[in-house]
Image (tube, rainbow, N blue to C red):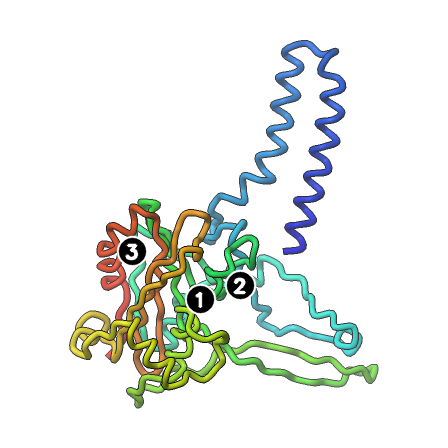
């Protein structure tokens, strides 16, 4: 975020200098020279700002998304870094997490089919406000396993899979020079426990936070809050959940916040959670006004794309 801000400021400063210099000299230039200077200035402008609104090869929008990074060897923090609270470790393209949707779904016993009408992204984080509204970061979360962008331009799906959840592991070592180094690494949790059919309490904690009941996601859901949640969600029958997704539970609920908007165009309208073996995959539907009128089409495509193993 700081890197982007610095580059924007640097570009704005350079642009101002160029403009001042060339405006002072426009009066002494021929018409063709003026056109040439204007074309050069526009050529400088387009690469710096135009790319923010374009889709990268990883299916991301740099203005709103930042890739998920993971150093496979772990992050090493020296005693001096810890003392100074310097936890910034530069990341490179080589550290971008790739194929996360495939790994995460496989980890919970879920298969998915890549639909040709969607552009499918790598894992990413939603940039915090002001890039994205605070309401969107709350209703959709900020850690997204993948976004699916429909070719009609009216729908984007945020896919979030519990198979992406990782636990932190640390290793404290003493170097040859006697100094300590703390190695921090996030490791994927163990695969799904296929002997359970419970509906975990954590599911309702997530839903409660997303639909605006309670302040914190980590709060334990009270009986009163559970009643409020039940009034807002739709739980599929076990037969329908098994038939469509081979799931044990399927829960849908609307998102009522009008400020939960992505890219100034797509409003977060609904979530669908499919649950099995206490693991889950959530699909968030972000739609334009036209897309919302045909939400059944996108829901049908989601039904075609995901299915739990037996």
Front label number (1 vs 2): 2
Q: Quadrant of the C terminus?
A: bottom left
**In terms of secondary structure, where does tag 3 sit?**
loop
x, y percent for residue 274: 30, 73
**In terms of secondary structure, where does tag 1 sit?**
helix
- The residue that disc 3 covers is 115
Q: Is residue 34 above or below residue 135?
A: above
x, y percent for residue 292: 29, 52
At label 2, counting other C-alpha atoms closer than 10 Å, the crowd grade (few under 14, some 14-19, many 20 or more) is some
The residue under the point 51% across, 60% down is: 134
Q: Distance from label 2 to label 3 (Cα)? A: 23 Å
**In terms of secondary structure, where does tag 2 sit?**
loop
- The residue that disc 1 covers is 100
Q: Pick whichever of labels 3 and 1 is earlier in the sequence.
A: 1
Report if the CB atoms under discs 1 and 2 are less than 8 Å apart.
yes
Report if the CB atoms under discs 2 and 3 are less than 8 Å apart.
no
Q: Distance from label 3 to label 1 (Cα)? A: 17 Å
The residue under the point 63% across, 83% down is: 170
Residue lying furthest right in this view?
177
The residue under the point 28% across, 87% down is: 197
At label 1, counting other C-alpha atoms closer than 10 Å, the crowd grade (few under 14, some 14-19, many 20 or more) is some
Q: Distance from label 1 to label 2 (Cα)? A: 10 Å
Q: In this view, does 156 lie above or below 181?
A: above
- The residue that disc 2 covers is 68
Q: Pick whichever of labels 2 and 3 is earlier in the sequence.
A: 2
- The residue nearer to you, when weighing 48 against 19, is 19
At label 3, counting other C-alpha atoms closer than 10 Å, the crowd grade (few under 14, some 14-19, many 20 or more) is some
Which label number is shown at residue 237? Answer: none
């Amino acid at each position: 975020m700081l890197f982007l801000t610095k580059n924007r400021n640097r570009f704005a400063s350079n642009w101002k200098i160029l403009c001042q210099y060339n405006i002072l000299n426009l009066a002494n230039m021929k018409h063709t020279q003026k056109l040439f200077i204007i074309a050069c200035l526009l050529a400088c402008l387009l690469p710096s700002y135009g790319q923010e609104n374009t889709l990268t090869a990883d299916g991301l929008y740099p203005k709103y998304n930042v890739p998920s990074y993971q150093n496979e060897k772990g992050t090493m923090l020296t005693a001096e870094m810890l003392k100074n609270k310097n936890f910034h470790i530069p990341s490179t393209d080589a550290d971008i997490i790739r194929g996360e949707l495939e790994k995460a779904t496989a980890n919970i016993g879920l298969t998915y089919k890549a639909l040709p009408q969607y552009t499918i992204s790598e894992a990413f984080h939603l940039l915090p406000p002001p890039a994205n509204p605070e309401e969107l970061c709350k209703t959709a979360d900020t850690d997204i396993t993948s976004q699916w962008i429909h070719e009609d331009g009216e729908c984007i799906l945020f896919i979030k899979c519990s198979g992406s959840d990782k636990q932190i592991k640390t290793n404290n070592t003493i170097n040859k020079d006697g100094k300590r180094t703390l190695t921090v690494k996030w490791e994927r949790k163990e695969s799904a426990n296929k002997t359970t059919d419970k509906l975990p309490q954590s599911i309702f904690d997530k839903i409660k936070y997303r639909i605006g009941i309670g302040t914190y996601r980590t709060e334990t859901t009270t009986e009163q809050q559970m009643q409020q949640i039940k009034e807002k969600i739709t739980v599929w029958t076990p037969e329908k959940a098994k038939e469509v997704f081979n799931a044990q539970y399927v829960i849908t609920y609307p998102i009522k916040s009008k400020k939960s908007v992505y890219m100034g165009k797509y409003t977060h309208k609904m979530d669908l959670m499919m649950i099995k073996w206490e693991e889950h995959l959530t699909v968030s539907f972000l739609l334009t006004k036209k897309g919302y009128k045909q939400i059944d089409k996108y829901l049908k495509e989601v039904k075609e794309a995901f299915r739990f193993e037996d």
